[in-house]
Amino acid sequence: MRFEFATASRIVFGVGVLKEAGALAAGLGRRAFVVTGRSGERAAPLLADLQAAGVEAVTFTVAGEPTTDLVREGTAQARGAGCDLVIGIGGGSVIDTGKAIAALLTNGGDPLDYLEVIGRGRPITQPSVPYIAIPTTAGTGAEVTANAVLAAQREGSREHRLKVSLRSPLMLPRVALVDPALTYSMPPALTASTGLDAFAQVLEPYVSLLANPLTDTLCREGLMRVAHSLRRAYQNGNDAEAREDMALVSLFGGLALANAKLGAVHGLAGVLGGMFDAPHGALCGRLLPFVMDANVKALQARDPDNPALERYDDVAVILTGEWDVEAADGVAWVQDLCKALGVPGLATYGVTAGVFADVIDKAMASSSMKGNPIKLTPAEVRGILMRAL
Ligand SMILES: NC(=O)c1ccc[n+]([C@@H]2O[C@H](COP(=O)([O-])OP(=O)(O)OC[C@H]3O[C@@H](n4cnc5c(N)ncnc54)[C@H](O)[C@@H]3O)[C@@H](O)[C@H]2O)c1
């Protein structure tokens, strides 16, 4: 056995840890480029703490999922303002924007120089400017991952945008500050979509071809907490125990995906998210039960000795809390959950069967697909999309 495990240099977790950000920042730089979401409200206490700690702050707002243009603009502003530290406080979109800016500040050049799949794929060679990542959704786990997902187009092309990553262990945040209280304000639909993303991120690495004993432990623990707390957090956003559980699931998902990869759920969600204006988590949630079902059937038919099959049985045991269950019961449990959480079909976002051929082509080439426990055929992927429509 050989595996590697890389993550943020320091993880600080707990209700109220946001107030430690000022002191942490003062140890890392003097002028912070603070990337926030649309609502400045969530960042206000942080900005006050930075001021109290003697750290100057220049703010930058991210209004949607990040693009190469947004990252170019942020990097130019941060460089112009002479920032020596980046802080991202928000959902995955904000965290990834800050992560990309922190990397470009030291590596120079353009995002397209480094982007995988559609960019020039040049390696990142310099460690990022110190980066403090503070998530407010639960979530993407992006506070502990080595990539930043950007929507981008090939240079000079007019084809649909793709969601692709800048990726390097050198991009891992210096500090991941996870304060579950920051997620209390998420409304139910956002709790559902981001929670299902976190769920998929502890499930896909557990059945991934690249799973290792360390990610397995995180995934099993994460799945248990999903079963205990996702519905509760959706029903009552002030349920502190459920919010804490989901913040942990998100963190564990980030740790797992960065070290064991993902699978077809994220392979497809990444492509659909580039083409349609749909929240990443909602796409993941919709695809999750159908991908599980297709993977289990493909494994049973073509690779019955693959250890992932037993893992899908484990998943069913963990999720249902019963011993005499198998993979199909896990799929049914996830289907019930998605129904309870009001997850809409893909057609809600304008997806039609007419785009499937293009989606399938692109998803098959995505980096997430490489972790899927079995290579699905184009017909199987089409079946997933049809059911999810
Ligand atoms: N880098 C990685 O490892 C990784 C992993 C998974 C997903 N992602 C990326 O992350 C992005 C999605 O991130 P996300 O799902 O966190 O959503 P998001 O960051 O796009 O935020 C969604 C919405 O939630 C709002 N919001 C954030 N926190 C809130 C709070 N506490 N209360 C109320 N509203 C709040 C935001 O303002 C925004 O309108 C996608 O671009 C996806 O591709 C990255």
Image (cartoon, rainbow, N blue to C red):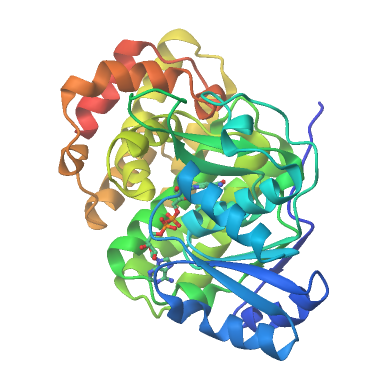
Between 193 and 230, the one lying in front of the other is: 193
Q: Residue at x 75, y 50 (%)?
A: 128
384 sits to left or right of 245 = left
Q: Is residue 24 above or below residue 319?
A: below
Q: Which residue extends farthest top?
A: 302
- Horizontal arrangement in the rendering, residue 49 relative to residue 4 (left or right): left
Residue 119 in the image: state x and y as whole percent: 56, 26
Q: Residue furthest bottom?
A: 52
Quarter that holds the N terminus: top right
Quarter of the image where ligand 1 sits: bottom left
Work out whether 195 lies above or below 335. below
- At horizontal 25% and vertical 21% (from top left) the residue drawn is 356
Residue 29 in the image, given as x and y percentages of width and height? 79, 70
Give the side of residue 102 with respect to residue 161, left or right. right
Number of numbered markers: 0
Residue visible at 33% across and 76% down?
236
